Image (spheres, rainbow, N blue to C red):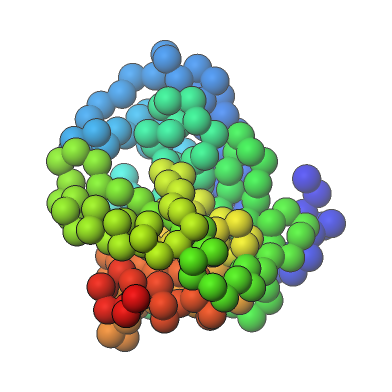
C-alpha cells in the first residue's frame, strides 16, 4: 500500500510504519514456515521464537537510524536510554506469539511513541490480515486509509467485550475468571483474540464495544491506547485511580457511554 495515499501520515508515523512493514516481511516468511522454527520457553506457555527476536532487531535498527536520540523500551532485548528524555519508542515485535505458532493470523507488530510518559503515536500492523492501524495524538485513528470510530452502543446488555485470560503459570487467574463471569452476566458476550494490541484496535474500530485485561506490559498496550483514544474511545485502568494505563498493568477501554457501567461490572459494584 502506498503511504502517500493514506491520510495524516506525519514523518514520525512514516518512520514507525516503515519499521513495522520491514519487520512484517521477516515475520511473514517465518509464519509460513512455523514448523521449522526453533522455539524456546519463556515461562509457562509463553513462547519466544527466533522470529520474534529477529523482528525486534529489524524494528530497533530502523528506529535508531531515524531517531537516534530517542529511548527504546523493548520486550525481548535491553532497554536503551536516549539523549532525548521526553521521547521513547515502546516495541512489541510479535504480540500474539501463541497465535503465530499455531498458525492463527491474529498477531501484530506494535510500535508506540511515548512522549513525556504518555502514549503519543501508535502503529499496530497485522501482517497476515494486512491490517495497518495507526494514530497520532490529535489527528485521528485509521485502518489502512479508513477513519476509525468506536461504537455508539450505549446499552451494556447489547455490548460485545474483549478480554485476555491468564494462561497456565501466570498470576491473576481467579480474579480474571470472576471478572469474566460478571461481564458475561451483563453483556451480549466476550471474545478473546489473544493479542492485547489487536483487542484495542478492534475496540477502536467499533467491532468490540469494550476491552479489559490485567497483567499487561507497556509494549502490549501503548500503541493500541493511542489508536483507541484517537478513535473516540475512553481508556483508563480498571480501577481508574489516575494511573497511566500503559504503565499500570491493567486496562479498560470502551466508548464513553459504556465505560462507567463496564467498570462497575468488573469491580462488582453494579446494581442489578
Image location (x, y in percent) of residue 200 = 50, 60
In the image, is 223 to the left or to the right of 237?
Answer: right
User: Would you say residue 272 is visible in this rendering?
Assistant: yes
Q: Nearer the viewer, residue 65 or 137?
A: 137
- Which residue sits at x=45%, y=20%? 34
In the image, is 208 to the left or to the right of 114?
Answer: right
Q: In this view, does 153 lie above or below 17?
A: below
Image location (x, y in percent) of residue 134 = 62, 61
Quadrant of image for the N terminus: top right
Residue 3 lies in quadrant: bottom right
Quadrant of image for the C terminus: bottom left
Q: Is residue 81 above or below residue 271?
A: above
- Which residue sits at x=54%, y=64%? 158
- Which residue sits at x=53%, y=80%? 256
Residue 145 lies in quadrant: bottom right
Q: In this view, does 238 lie above or below 184?
A: below
Amino acid at each position: 500500500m502506498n503511504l502517500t495515499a493514506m491520510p495524516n501520515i506525519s514523518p514520525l508515523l512514516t518512520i514507525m510504519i516503515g519499521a513495522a512493514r520491514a519487520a512484517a516481511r521477516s515475520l511473514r516468511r517465518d509464519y509460513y514456515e512455523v514448523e521449522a522454527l526453533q522455539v524456546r520457553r519463556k515461562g509457562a506457555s509463553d513462547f519466544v521464537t527466533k522470529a520474534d527476536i529477529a523482528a525486534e532487531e529489524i524494528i530497533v535498527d530502523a528506529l535508531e537510524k531515524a531517531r537516534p536520540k530517542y529511548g527504546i523500551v523493548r520486550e525481548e532485548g535491553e532497554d536503551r536510554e536516549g539523549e532525548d528524555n521526553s521521547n521513547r519508542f515502546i516495541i512489541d515485535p510479535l504480540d500474539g506469539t501463541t497465535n503465530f505458532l499455531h498458525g492463527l493470523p491474529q498477531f501484530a507488530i506494535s510500535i508506540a511513541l511515548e512522549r513525556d510518559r504518555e502514549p503519543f503515536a501508535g502503529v499496530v500492523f497485522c501482517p497476515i490480515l494486512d491490517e495497518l492501524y495507526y494514530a497520532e495524538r490529535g489527528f485521528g485513528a485509521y485502518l489502512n486509509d479508513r477513519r476509525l470510530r468506536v461504537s455508539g452502543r450505549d446499552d451494556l446488555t447489547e455490548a460485545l467485550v474483549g478480554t485476555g485470560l491468564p494462561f497456565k503459570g501466570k498470576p491473576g487467574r481467579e480474579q480474571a475468571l470472576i471478572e469474566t463471569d460478571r461481564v458475561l452476566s451483563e453483556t451480549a458476550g466476550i471474545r478473546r483474540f489473544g493479542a492485547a494490541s489487536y483487542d484495542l484496535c478492534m475496540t477502536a474500530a467499533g467491532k468490540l464495544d469494550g476491552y479489559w485485561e490485567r497483567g499487561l506490559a507497556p509494549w502490549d498496550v501503548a500503541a493500541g491506547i493511542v489508536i483507541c483514544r484517537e478513535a473516540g474511545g475512553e481508556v483508563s485502568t480498571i480501577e481508574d485511580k489516575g494511573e497511566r494505563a500503559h504503565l499500570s498493568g491493567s486496562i479498560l477501554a470502551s466508548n464513553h457511554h459504556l465505560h462507567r457501567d463496564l467498570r462497575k461490572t468488573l469491580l462488582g459494584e453494579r446494581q442489578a
